[in-house]
Image (tube, rainbow, N blue to C red):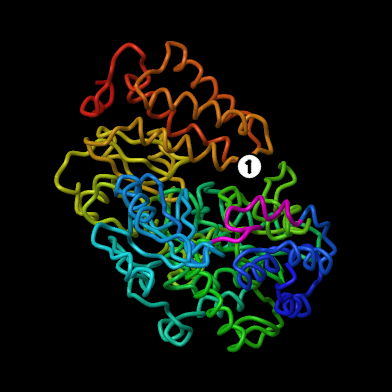
Amino acid sequence: MSNIDLAPIHAFLDHTTPKDRSNLLPALHAAQDEYGYIPEIAAAEIAKALSVPLADVFGVIDFYSLLYSRPVGKTVVHVCKDPACMMAGADTVLKMLSSQLTYFDDAREKPLYTIEIAPCLGLCEQAPAILVDGIAAKADQTFSISKLFSEPKRYLNTTVDGDVRFLTKNCGLGESVNLNRYLQNGGYSALKKALQLTPAEVVEQVKLSGLVGRGGAAFPTGVKWEGAIASPEKVKFVVCNGDEAEPGTFKDRILMEDDPHQIIEGMIICAYAIGAEKGYFYIRAEYQNAANQVKAALDDCRNSGFLGDSIMDSDFNFDIELRRGAGAYICGEETALFESIEGKRGFPRIKPPFPTQAGLFGKPTVINNVETLANVALIFNLGIEAYRALGTEKSPGTKLFCLSGDISRPGLYEVPFGVTLRHIIEDLAGGMREEIPFLAALIGGAAGAIASPEELDTKLSFEDLRRAGLPLGSGVITVFNQNRDLRAILFKLASFFAEESCGKCYPCQIGTQRQLEIMERVNAGNPDDRDERRLSDLIETMTDSSLCGLGQTAGSAIKSAMIKWPHLFSPSATISTSQVGGPHD
């Protein structure tokens, strides 16, 4: 430890304000960026400067999967093993990397490479995907290991398409839209219109638009903003949730990378509406490029008068601080995200009180998803009538869907609410790859449900999906062909939740482990005669008793499969892959 130069971390801490626990994650990131990991002596300096017990500092480090308290390789490689990447050969990539990389230099003082398995990197359309020191790449059969590590670069060939291009009009072009271009295309005109209204009128416009949250909960956005306004507290916050970690989801990543200003504009309008002077833009640690693009956009906004004091010559003051996550799926839950910003482990809070009453730092807080905030500027630019003309009466506007798996053109597709699942798979995404028939689709991500062939003509709207027993979720559609074994997919989902449960509440902590044990037997083709009943009871208990959405939805995909493919869970027959082809076979 004596050879560690603490000058860089001292310089960071000297310029850190305020010097309290709320800056713990930024300080830990600074230390790891400097040293490659967080040495104990650096952790002690951070603890002292921020008045945080050293045990708490290490508790935070150990909680997050991308913070390291011990040395790691000079190059850290993350191999994604979400369902899309697993189907695309992630196991082969992992074996190839493990066999071909040289782990130690000649002196054997420090590993050259550290290879880690990631539950989802948000690169599902690039499957099989990897990160090399935070830089995304597609590790298909043609990639060269030597070139990958000598010239790592972001893989840009993402399909962005759809029936309409409102939220995605600046996406998929291979570059991030800068402020000048955003302004040329009408950027910040929505903010100008909003500033000419009273805050109450802004909220009323959002309510009339029918906008609901696009992160999965589907709560009415205007009602949420109204709840924060109702609080007598003077200090209020706006938070953008960019912790997109639901397996199969990558829409927010593309919005943040390619068109960050439309999200920022939505945040500023929200802040004006509720009377907030400070906001936080929280982005998951795996999204390094997205964080870079958002930071550049925030800097440009400050330099051009769109953030800071007297925004657009008004008496409205507001600024946004960028925060990086550190590797925890649970931090996508709003209250766990608050805990993370406050410098704690990302445990969800008991509700009520709700965030609009007591959120970040105990103050009224509006937290919205990236896609939700991107819709705000669109509403003011199009007008209420034009916005509501898109989609359906109960599901107005457009929706971004992330398509991956066994389809010809994985990518991001923007459609009006109300198109069918068949249309988006067959017409937009090019149908099934290699023309192998459709078996099923996971709708809504790991926390979603599985659609059968009979449900291909279901309309993609909140009301129609609800009637079909399918969640819209975060807009995930992962497609499986008839060569896939659904038991393996479900086992993978069970593994994901068992690993990602934060352990705070007993139903989720124990329930996800027991669910995994049962699904391991199901996947092996040898469940016992009581497993189906056990699984049903477990899922019901987790759904009814878990503290947050992770446990409440940890068994939803498995439950849907139990209803549509009951033979998968039966101990009475040996089931080959070819026998998994349709519901109720």
Magenta stretch holds residue 464? no
Image coordinates of residue 450 in percent, x first then y, are 36, 35
> In this picture, is 304 found above or below 137?
below
Q: Amino acid at mark 1?
A: Cys
Question: Do we see residue 496 in this rendering?
Answer: yes
> In this picture, is 176 found above or below 138?
below
Q: Name the residue: 32% across, 43% down.
A: 459
Q: Residue furthest left?
A: 435
User: Nearest the camera: 554 or 78?
Assistant: 78
Q: Which residue is mark 1?
A: 502
Which quarter of the picture shows residue 452? top left
Image coordinates of residue 422 in percent, x first then y, are 24, 45
> In this picture, is 85 found above or below 584?
below
Question: Residue 367 vs residue 582: left or right?
Answer: right
Q: Label 1: state its secondary structure.
A: loop
Q: Which residues are magenta?
A: 57-72
Q: Name the residue: 48% across, 53% down.
A: 116
User: Nearest the camera: 47 or 82?
Assistant: 47
